[in-house]
């Protein structure tokens, strides 16, 4: 349990960001006021810092099972996604199309929109009602014009795990590169890039208990790469800009912890998530899980409480100190279901009442029990004042 301004906080929003692990915080601390040298400097004060960056690179490579030289440190997942996509388009000028899925994060989808404005072609593969990618359609969309296919490893809203190796193989059969946004996958499920068909992979520190402001891009040896950030010779000329030393060291430490603990943490986190989910489904009438429960991150549960607004649920949960997310966002004054739930065709009455709980190893059984005690009466209260529930829900 965490505290915020003296109030108990139950944090179940770990797909948004995670707490910096205490061990990670300790590992990065010396790089502010003691070992603050510039790793590019010639003197040994800077050189010592450069060595720590290489140690962090090896730790991250250990988590991904790749070669350390295949890792480029960046500032975040968004930068990694942009770097991969721009690089592929720049180096393959005869092909002016990318293929993505309809459920990508805005870091990819909004870039795709920008590419459309710049005259590129973009195709979006649809998903079914469980959020699974339509593989037939994906196969049809990847053609000889396609420079890159980019599909996320795991979805941030539903937790769905996509068949990235299979899609990468299809891309390769058309002479196309494959990139995956693995921002939600790394640290939550085992990743093995040795012998994989994935050419490029993005990740972000703040999703795996490192701080915000550091990320990485894996670029497979032999895959040509054009830098997105052009400047100094940092990262072997592949990403200009003085390294975020403390952040990189932190990411290395977080990777080390994830590699060591992933199996045991997954068992624990999955058990808590399953308890929360199955209990809510049995305690609250008219609720449903969004996503593919047979292929999902162990920490994520996206539940629709039908006939009420997710935002209202979030506000009441917030008063109780419980942090979660909703599957709708306020655009132009009205609540719009998220693009992911819309792509899945989740009915209006369910999409609006969707809540994403995303757990971490720091959650406890007591916290889950507290949420289970509070949510059923909270939903009942909201339904009492919901015109939708009075009109349709109660009778359906
Ligand atoms: C799937 C996915 N991709 C990319 C990002 C962006 O990562 P960052 O916040 O590090 O830019 C996020 C963040 O929520 C994400 O969930």
Image (tube, rainbow, N blue to C red):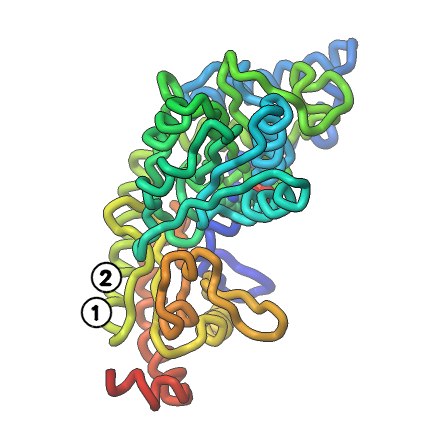
Q: Which mark is residue 274?
A: none
Q: Is residue 269 above or below residue 228?
A: below
Q: Nearer the viewer, residue 199 or 188?
A: 199
Q: Is residue 99 above or below residue 91?
A: below
Q: Secondary structure at mark 2?
A: helix
Q: Position of residue 243 (x, y in %)?
A: 69, 26
Q: Is mark 2 within 8 Å of ligand 1?
A: no
- What residue is rendered at 36% in x and 62% in y? 345
Q: Secondary structure at mark 1?
A: helix
Q: Nearer the viewer, residue 323 or 394?
A: 394
Q: Which mark is residue 282?
A: 1
Q: Is residue 284 above or below residue 13?
A: below
- What residue is rendered at 53% in x and 59% in y? 3
Which image quarter is the C terminus in?
Answer: bottom left
Decide: few, some or many residues near mark 1? Use Cα within 10 Å; few <14, some 14-19, many ≥20.
few
Q: Position of residue 42 (x, y in %)?
A: 78, 9
Which image quarter is the N terminus in?
Answer: bottom left
Q: Nearer the viewer, residue 241 or 262?
A: 241
Q: Nearer the viewer, residue 234 or 130?
A: 130
Residue that numbered label 2 is attached to: 278
Q: Quick check: marks 2 and 1 in contact, CB under 8 Å?
A: yes
Query: Is residue 214 among the parts visible in the rendering?
Result: no
Q: Is residue 66 above or below residue 82?
A: above
């Amino acid at each position: 349990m965490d505290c915020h301004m003296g109030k108990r906080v139950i944090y179940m929003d770990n797909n948004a960001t995670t707490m910096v692990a205490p061990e990670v915080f300790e590992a990065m601390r010396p790089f502010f006021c003691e070992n603050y040298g510039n790793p590019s400097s010639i003197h040994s004060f800077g050189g010592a810092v450069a060595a720590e960056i290489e140690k962090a690179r090896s730790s991250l490579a250990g988590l991904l099972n790749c070669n350390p030289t295949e890792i480029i440190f960046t500032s975040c997942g968004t930068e990694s996604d942009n770097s991969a996509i721009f690089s592929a388009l720049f180096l393959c000028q005869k092909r002016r199309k990318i293929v993505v899925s309809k459920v990508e994060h805005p870091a990819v989808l909004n870039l795709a929109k920008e590419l459309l404005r710049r005259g590129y072609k973009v195709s979006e593969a649809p998903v079914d009602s469980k959020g699974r990618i339509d593989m037939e359609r994906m196969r049809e969309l990847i053609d000889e014009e396609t420079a890159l296919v980019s599909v996320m490893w795991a979805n941030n809203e539903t937790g769905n795990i996509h068949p990235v190796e299979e899609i990468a193989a299809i891309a390769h059969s058309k002479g196309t590169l494959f990139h995956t946004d693995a921002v939600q996958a790394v640290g939550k499920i085992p990743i093995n890039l040795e012998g994989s068909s994935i050419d490029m992979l993005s990740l972000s520190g703040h999703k795996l208990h490192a701080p915000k402001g550091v990320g990485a891009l894996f670029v497979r040896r032999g895959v040509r790469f054009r830098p997105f950030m052009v400047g100094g010779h940092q990262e072997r000329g592949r990403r200009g800009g003085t390294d975020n030393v403390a952040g990189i060291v932190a990411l290395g430490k977080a990777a080390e912890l994830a590699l060591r603990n992933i199996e045991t943490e997954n068992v624990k986190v999955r058990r808590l998530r399953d308890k929360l989910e199955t209990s809510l489904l049995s305690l609250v009438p008219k609720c449903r899980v969004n996503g593919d429960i047979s292929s999902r991150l162990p920490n994520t549960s996206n539940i629709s409480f039908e006939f009420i607004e997710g935002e209202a649920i979030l506000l009441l949960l917030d008063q109780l100190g419980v942090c979660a997310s909703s599957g709708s966002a306020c655009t132009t004054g009205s609540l719009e279901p998220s693009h992911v739930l819309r792509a899945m065709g989740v009915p209006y009455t369910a999409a609006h009442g969707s809540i994403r709980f995303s757990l971490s190893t720091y959650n406890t059984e007591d916290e889950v029990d507290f949420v289970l005690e509070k949510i059923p009466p909270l939903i009942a209260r909201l339904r009492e004042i919901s015109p939708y529930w009075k009109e349709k829900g109660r009778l359906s």
